[in-house]
Structures are given as C-alpha cells and as structure tokens.
Amino acid sequence: MNLPVPAGVDATGYTLGPPQRAGALSMVPVFGPSYPGIAPPRSGLKLSRVVTYGQVELTNPAASGVAIVPLHVGYIQDSAQNHALCRSAFIAAGQTLRFDDACCVQESQGGYLSERDQWFFVLPVELRPAALRLRGTSQYSKLWGDIARFNGSHGLPARGHLEQVLTRKRAVLTQYQSRLELLDGQVGALFFVGGELAGVEIAPDPVYFAEVWTALVCFAYGPAAWSHALSTSEPAAEPCAAGSLDEVRTGLRRRRQSVADEVGAWLERASWRPDSLVEEDRYLGLRLSTVDGPAVGGQVVTDGSRLVYASLFAAAA
C-alpha cells in the first residue's frame, strides 16, 4: 500500500503498518522520517483569546520552533464561546496570530482562557469540506447550518451546537482511543470508515502526532464511525477454532493477514486521489498549500517537495 498524497509531494521513507480495527473505524498507522523544529499542537500551541464571535487568537509560546496549526482544530472551553478554525497556519515562536475567519460552533460569552479551561478537537470529517470552502470568509455563524444537519444525521436536535456530539457523546467517542493503539514512532494514519477511505493524517514527528491523536481518532473520525455503526449491522468476528496454542497463533496470523488484505483492497479502490496543490502561505522554506477538489480536500505543508504535514479528507464524507 502506498501513501496517497498529491502529485509532486515526496513521501519517500514513509511506510504503512498493520491495520487496526474498532467496529466501523479502521486505522492504518504510518511511519516515516521526522521533520525537526515544529512545535507540537497541545504543549506548543495555545488558544489565548476569543476576541469576539468569529475571531480567535492562537499563540506559540515556545522559545524556538514554528507551530503548524492543525487543520480544522477547535477548542472547547469555559467562559468563552467554542470555535473551530477553517484553515491551518504557521505561527513563529513567541508570536500570536489572529484568525478572523474562525467558526463559532456554540454561542457563549467571549473572554480570556486559562489552560485548565480548554481542550481541543478536530472538526468531524463530515463538516470538514464545508469548513475548508469557508476559509477566508469572516462570518461567525457560517457553519451553523452544516452543524445542524450533522446533528440531525446523528439523531440529535438539528441545532448549530457541535457540543451536542463532542461533549454529550464524548464517552462513546473516546472508546476509539482505547480500542485503536497509537504505536511508538507513528507519525500518521490512514482512516477508513465502513470500508471507505475517509482521511490521511501525517504529522512532522511522533510527538506532534501523539498530541493530535485523540482529537483525530475520537472527534474527527469517531462520529462518522459511530453513525455508521448505528445504521448498519457489522458482522461479528467468527471465533478462532483451535486445538492447540500453535493453532491459535496460526489462526491469528491468518486473521490479521485477511484484515490487511481487505484494507489494502479498500485503499486500492479508493475513488479519490488528491488534486494539485494551491500555495496559501510560506514560512522560511515551508509552504502551506490547499487541496480543494471534488473528491479530496485538505491542506499540506512541504519543504521543497518533501512532505512535512498533511491533513486530507474525502470531500464526500
């Protein structure tokens, strides 16, 4: 299996590990080279202020290292309205960047935040195509209609309040964090929902990916897997009939190979291939580019042609 990235992006050195499965959600771990000097998103990036509806400020408090803001990151916090971003960005060490095109995902009061008051998520994959198209648009309520439809599709009141899923269903969604294992040295993952490729997430290094892992597996792809499981009947795995320990081991190897073959076939038949990149921003030698095609959306960071960061998702999710 090859890493599906846009043409012209050099993914040399990246390899795919054995797939893991938790109900309708399958994850293929990605291993590859680390890119130094990137501040991780939880310990090296802070939401410092909600200026007003649709305007938020993020700070990179590190003494060195540029922060790559995770695409479609959002924050749940006390004493301020919850927001999500429509785009990625670079923030230099010690700098603060204001996003005027953020999405308000719940009405509340603005204000300053303390670290204990906030945790971050990544927008559910069902909302990410709309959020990407709305980057650069300054209208705080611009995603409410999509959120209302998203909530309705999950059997919840059709309102523009994302916390109905992210907080009230948090116990259900966080099961994916415990059922899918983050591996040592993992820098990314391919996510499949119900046999369809839903996303490709690549981080600059294992520390960055470990810090964004929960936001991705539980909140970006967890809701789609949860919804799929509710609407379909997944066949239970057949018990492994064996008369000895060696037969058990043989049966497990066969089952793992069967899953690997199945997931490989899903990737081969995936109807989406990333379109060409459109450059949006630069920081020294790093370039932030957007993919916004009919089948695939997302953003990619490269150094020359070398892959540094990618967050790509099925546009029809």
Image (spheres, rainbow, N blue to C red):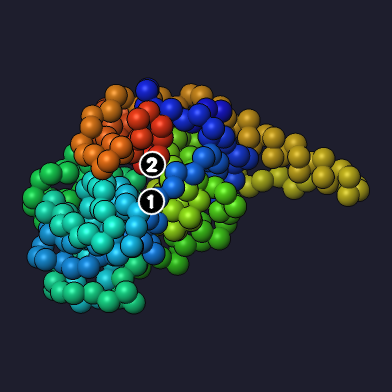
* Quadrant assignment, res 102: bottom left
> What percent of the width, then of the height, locates residue 197?
44, 35
Above or below for 35 versus 268: below
Residue plotted at (16% across, 43% down)? 134
For numbered disc 2, what is the local secondary structure? strand
Would you call the spot at circle 1 few (<14 residues within 10 Å), some (14-19), or many (20 or more)?
A: many
Residue plotted at (24% across, 39% down)? 282
Which residue has dot 1 on it? 38
Above or below for 218 versus 108: above
Above or below for 156 versus 142: below
Q: Along the line of sight, which residue is nearer the eye, 285 or 226? A: 285
Q: Amino acid at mark 1?
A: Ile
Can residue 96 be seen by looking at this rendering?
Answer: yes
Q: Amino acid at mark 2?
A: Tyr
Which residue is at the far right?
A: 244
Q: CB under 8 Å between callouts 2 and 1?
A: yes
For numbered disc 1, what is the local secondary structure? strand
Q: Nearer the viewer, mark 2 or mark 1?
A: 1
* Quadrant assignment, res 305: top left
Q: Say left or right for 64 vs 22.
A: left
Residue 309: assigned label? 2
Q: Along the line of sight, which residue is nearer the eye, 241 or 69? A: 69
